[in-house]
Image: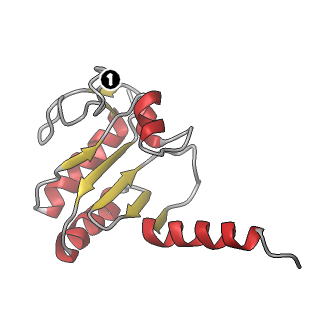
Amino acid sequence: MPNEIVTEMVHFTGTELSCNCGCGLVGLTQHFADKVEYAREKAGVAFVVRSSRRCDYWNTLQGGKGNSEHLWGDALDVEAKDSFTRWKIVKAAIDAGIRRIGIGATFVHLGDGLQYSPYPVIWNYAFAGAVAKEAEDLDGIDS
């Protein structure tokens, strides 16, 4: 079943797929888990999980959106400390059909929440923050 929650995978333990606050919420949706496993195999590098499933409390503390893919088990943040590792993860994720990819300074967000967009997207967290800051700065300017 596509919406079934998977709590153990070939390359990932239940601990890695658990909310980081310790509440016990765990797992990815089956359709996303299958894509992540394929991407991990294809990338040929370990996917060190920094964030997986999140409860509402932890998501809020992390600055996540109210409808974050992490809340539903459709997202994983994977460590990527150098550009070559980042490239391998992103390339493999695209090949696996993962449709939402966010690039951070030390991680890659992999998401497949279809509630967000009917088409694939890639964003850069640093750029997104700069755009938000610029918009905030412009709010105080009279036209």
Q: Quarter of the image for the C terminus: give it.
A: bottom right
Q: Is residue 25 above or below residue 50?
A: above
Name the outermost residue toward the bottom. 143
Name the outermost residue toward the right. 143
Task: Tell me residue 58's x, y (percent).
Answer: 40, 33
Total residue callouts: 1
Q: Is residue 60 above or below residue 22?
A: below
Report which quarter residue 134 is drawn in. bottom right
Name the outermost residue toward the top. 24
Q: Which residue corresponds to the image point at 30% horizontal and 48% vertical from the top-left?
A: 35
Q: Between 62 and 66, which is closer to the camera in this rendering?
A: 62
Q: Which residue corresponds to the image point at 18% horizontal and 76% vertical from the top-left?
A: 84
Q: Is residue 41 above or below residue 6?
A: below
* Callout 1 amino acid: Leu
- Residue that numbered label 1 is attached to: 25
Q: Which residue corresponds to the image point at 26% horizontal and 64% vertical from the top-left?
A: 106
Task: Tell me residue 110's x, y (percent).
Answer: 35, 53
Task: Tell me residue 121's x, y (percent).
Answer: 50, 64
Q: Between 26 and 57, which is closer to the camera in this rendering?
A: 57
Task: State the SS at label 1.
Answer: loop
Task: Tell me residue 141's x, y (percent).
Answer: 80, 75
Q: Quarter of the image for the N terminus: give it.
A: top left
Report which quarter residue 24 is drawn in. top left
- Colour scheme in use: secondary structure
Q: Which residue corresponds to the image point at 38% horizontal and 33% vertical from the top-left?
A: 54
Q: Between 65 and 95, which is closer to the camera in this rendering?
A: 65
Q: Is residue 72 left or right of residue 136?
A: left
- The residue carrying pointer 1 sits among few (fewer than 14), some (14 to 19) or many (20 or more) residues within 10 Å by Cα, namely some
